[in-house]
Image (cartoon, helix red, strand yellow):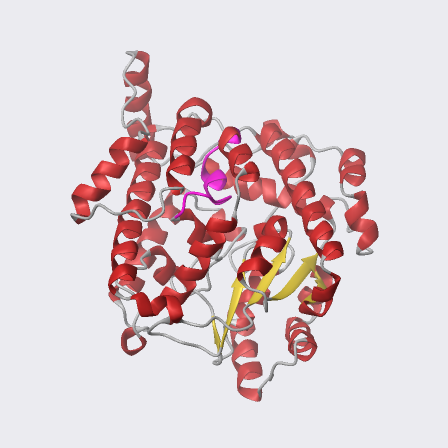
């Protein structure tokens, strides 16, 4: 299958009509709902009655991102509506969080002890490992609903009954309507563990935005931008979630931490890192398929060849950065544990047990039972089989082999069957 055979963007009739109206207006020289950072900031302030966004370093990210969407992403009218709603929500919650943190300085005193981060290329078993860790009653994972709607802060007494759970599920149902095949690639649910990359969207310094929008100039900006302030915000956000709903230990997950492991250790010196591994030639087209499916909800012009090129270069860069940090911090070697995708698929519970043993964590029978039940209810391919090939995204087997040669040699990565 080649890129020309990729499915076109899914368009229910109401969206086809809405986007047609948007195209008609643009043909008349009218670009409705233009992404404008100044207007978004003012709208959030008007909505909340608050003025203080905190450290203004986030403004440059917001500005670069909105400009990149206008000049590069080619969003449909649907994409504009969805994107601006997301940005307004992020700015609104940011205002509320900053105000809350000023009123409650004790939040900054919360201690985050030995947080466990699952990193590695996407599509390498990070999601299932993170979800399993979240089944341990002693481990706290950020759940989708509390990350999407972090104010007011979550409370222990209502943690399982908070109305934001139902609202988040409704929002996810809308996205399922927009991208009905997405769950064959990645599970969604209000009470499922969420990647901590979502924290950084409130700071507008996040790889998360490129999942929806092709914005290469923004991507280049955040690769060159000092991430230290972003990780300080990440830490404070985690304290916020923990303040009224504590756990003995956090389990977090974001593949993109690979590029910033030195900054992560600066912020969390006692962090524990589980790095997952898999053949990049199987991983990269799977990542590309995820992005293609997601971007189809926001544009009529998702470019599979450009997605293939961008993702190949990006993840080889991230892997190389991660290897460099590991080499430069030999004193942290015991804070790393490597595990392979094939092992996770063959016996996930045993993999978790090995993680606990390596980091001298207590693997209780209760935790094991909860994880076993979760696996029984969430079988692989529960929502269908994810299909993809290298050719779909213009990827060349030999070029990818060369690009990831150092990583594969370092971790003795075995080739899977051709994707």
Q: Position of residue 180 (x, y in %)?
A: 44, 46
The residue drawn where x is 81% and y is 43% is 405
Q: On screen, 155 above or below 267? A: below
* Residue 379 visible to the viewer: no
Q: Residue furthest top?
A: 28
Residue 152 part of the magenta segment: no
Q: Position of residue 386 (x, y in %)?
A: 59, 49
With 352 as the anchor, is 141 left or right in this view? left
With 377 as the anchor, is 261 left or right in this view? right
Q: On screen, 52 above or below 124? A: above
Question: What residue span does the magenta drawing correspond to?
Answer: 203-216
Residue 206 part of the magenta segment: yes
| Image quarter hosting the C terminus | top right
Q: Nearer the viewer, residue 218 or 328?
A: 328
The residue drawn where x is 52% and y is 80% is 370
Q: On screen, 371 above or below 163? A: below
The residue drawn where x is 44% and y is 77% is 247
Main secondary-structure element of the magenta-colored stretch: loop
Total numbered badges shown on the rendered structure: 0
| Image quarter hosting the N terminus | top right
Q: Residue furthest bottom?
A: 365
The residue drawn where x is 54% and y is 51% is 185
* Residue 44 visible to the viewer: yes
Q: Position of residue 415 (x, y in %)?
A: 80, 50
**Would you identify the image quadrant in which residue 388 lies?**
top right
Q: Nearer the viewer, residue 363 or 284?
A: 363
Q: Position of residue 416 (x, y in %)?
A: 77, 51
With 242 as the anchor, is 357 left or right in this view? right
With 212 as the anchor, is 371 left or right in this view? right
């Amino acid at each position: 299958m080649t890129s020309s055979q990729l499915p076109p963007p899914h368009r229910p009739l109401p969206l086809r009509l809405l986007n047609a109206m948007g195209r008609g207006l643009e043909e008349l020289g009218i670009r409705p709902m233009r992404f404008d950072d100044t207007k978004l900031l003012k709208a959030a302030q008007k909505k909340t009655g608050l003025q203080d966004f905190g450290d203004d370093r986030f403004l440059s990210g917001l500005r670069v991102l909105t400009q990149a969407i206008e000049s590069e992403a080619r969003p449909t009218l649907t994409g504009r509506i969805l994107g601006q709603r997301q940005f307004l929500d992020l700015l609104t919650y940011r205002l509320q969080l900053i105000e809350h943190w000023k009123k409650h300085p004790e939040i900054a005193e919360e201690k985050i002890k030995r947080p466990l981060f699952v990193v590695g290329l996407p599509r390498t078993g990070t999601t299932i490992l993170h979800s399993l860790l979240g089944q341990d009653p002693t481990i706290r994972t950020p759940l989708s609903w509390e990350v999407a709607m972090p104010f007011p802060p979550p409370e222990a007494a209502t943690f399982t009954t908070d109305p934001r759970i139902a609202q988040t599920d409704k929002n996810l149902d809308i996205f399922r309507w927009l991208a009905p095949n997405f769950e064959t690639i990645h599970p969604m649910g209000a009470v499922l563990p969420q990647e901590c990359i979502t924290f950084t969207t409130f700071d507008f310094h996040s790889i998360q935005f490129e999942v929806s929008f092709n914005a290469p100039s923004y991507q280049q900006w955040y690769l060159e931008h000092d991430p230290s302030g972003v990780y300080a915000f990440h830490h404070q956000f985690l304290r916020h979630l923990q303040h009224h709903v504590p756990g003995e230990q956090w389990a977090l997950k974001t593949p993109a931490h690979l590029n910033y492991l030195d900054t992560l250790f600066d912020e969390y010196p006692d962090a524990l890192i589980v790095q997952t591994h898999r053949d990049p030639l199987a991983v990269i087209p799977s990542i590309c398929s995820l992005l293609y499916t997601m971007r189809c909800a926001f544009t009529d012009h998702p470019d599979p060849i450009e997605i293939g090129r961008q993702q190949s270069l990006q993840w080889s860069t991230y892997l190389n950065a991660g290897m460099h940090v590991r080499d430069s911090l030999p004193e942290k070697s015991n804070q790393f544990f490597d595990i392979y995708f094939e092992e996770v698929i063959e016996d996930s519970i045993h993999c978790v047990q090995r993680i606990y043993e390596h980091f001298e964590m207590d693997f209780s029978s209760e935790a094991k039972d909860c994880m076993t039940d979760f696996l029984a209810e969430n079988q692989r391919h529960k929502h269908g089989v994810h299909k993809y090939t290298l050719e779909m995204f213009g990827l060349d087997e030999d070029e990818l082999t060369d690009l990831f040669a150092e990583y594969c040699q370092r971790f003795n990565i075995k080739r899977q069957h051709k994707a």
